Amino acid sequence: MIKLPIKNGRGDCAINPTKLIALGLNYRAHIAESVSVKVKGFTDEVPSEPLLFSKTPNVLIGPDQAIVIPRFLKEYGFKALRTDYEAELALIIGDRCKDVSAAAAWDYILGYTCMNDISQRNIQNGDRTGWYRGKSLDTFGPIGPQVVLARDLPDPQNLNICCRLNGKTVQEGNTRQMIFKIPEIIAFISKNFTLMPGDIILTGTPAGVGSLGHGDTVEVEIEHIGVLKNTVIDQTL
């Protein structure tokens, strides 16, 4: 479990989800770059419904903790390892949520924060079962730096979002560019799975994803939420 401060001195929020559900290809510009990312399942077609995958709770780390590229990856003999950053807006569910309409979806959101959907591309591309393992290695879900309660963020569908790698801006977008908007996402997910208090939804990443290396510093910044900063340790070196 991770504790994050709630903005405006409203105490702490315990981050302890039963599940993390994420969206792939939810920004058109990210779809356009999908050929260069070279991951199984990435196409240049706009999805007709939200493209879901999961991350497991063991991925979660807080601000200023290290993203660890694990040593065991050396055993595969990949020609070139690629582990990517992906800046995303994350929302935290506040109440049990099943079969809710898009119109009612806002009422089930506790708050918002930044996440970095770290992705091990070699595993993600190679596993026959899909994206599960490459998205769920330990430390592959930095979250923070704080939680902004839903009532304190009047327009989460219009937030600037960026990612910086060693001080250089590598991703820039705005949450209004999402293909599937937040209420549609919650309605679709809750039709398939019961969402529980504390569960986390990652809403997709804008264009500009790229690889991380040993000693890198990666920052995810979202307007009105703050900056999530982490460093990288590559144990394969």
Image (cartoon, helix red, strand yellow):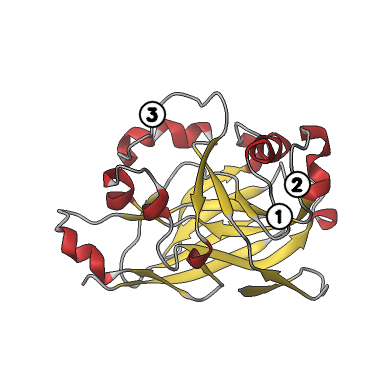
Disc 2 secondary structure class: loop
Residue designated by label 1: 196
- Is residue 203 left or right of 194 when viewed as pictured? left
Distance of label 3 from label 2 (alpha carbons): 31 Å
Residue 70 screen position, x and y as percent: 31, 69
Residue drawn 66% across the image and 34% down it: 188
For label 3, the residue is: 43
* Image coords of residue 152 (percent x, y): 83, 57
Label 2 or label 1, whichever comes before in sequence order: 2
Residue type at mark 1?
A: Met
In the depicted structure, whether residue 199 falls above or below residue 39? below
Q: State the residue in front, 214 or 4.
A: 4
- Side of 60 relative to 133 (left or right): right
- Amino acid of disc 3: Thr
SS for dot 3: loop
Q: How many marks?
A: 3
Image position, residue 63 (x, y; %): 56, 72
Separation of disc 2 and disc 1 at Cα? 6 Å
Specify the quadrant that holds the C terminus. Answer: bottom left
Q: Are marks 3 and 2 in contact (CB under 8 Å)?
A: no
Near mark 2 (Cα within 10 A), the count class, few <14, some 14-19 or many ≥20, is many
Name the residue located 52 percent from the left edge and 53 percent from the top edge: 87
Q: Which mark is first along the chain, 3 or 1?
A: 3
* Image marks 2 and 1: residues in contact by CB distance under 8 Å: yes
The residue labelled by disc 2 is: 97
> Which label's residue is closer to the chain start, 3 or 2?
3
In which quadrant of the rendered view does residue 187 lie? top right
Q: CA distance from mark 1 to mark 3?
A: 31 Å
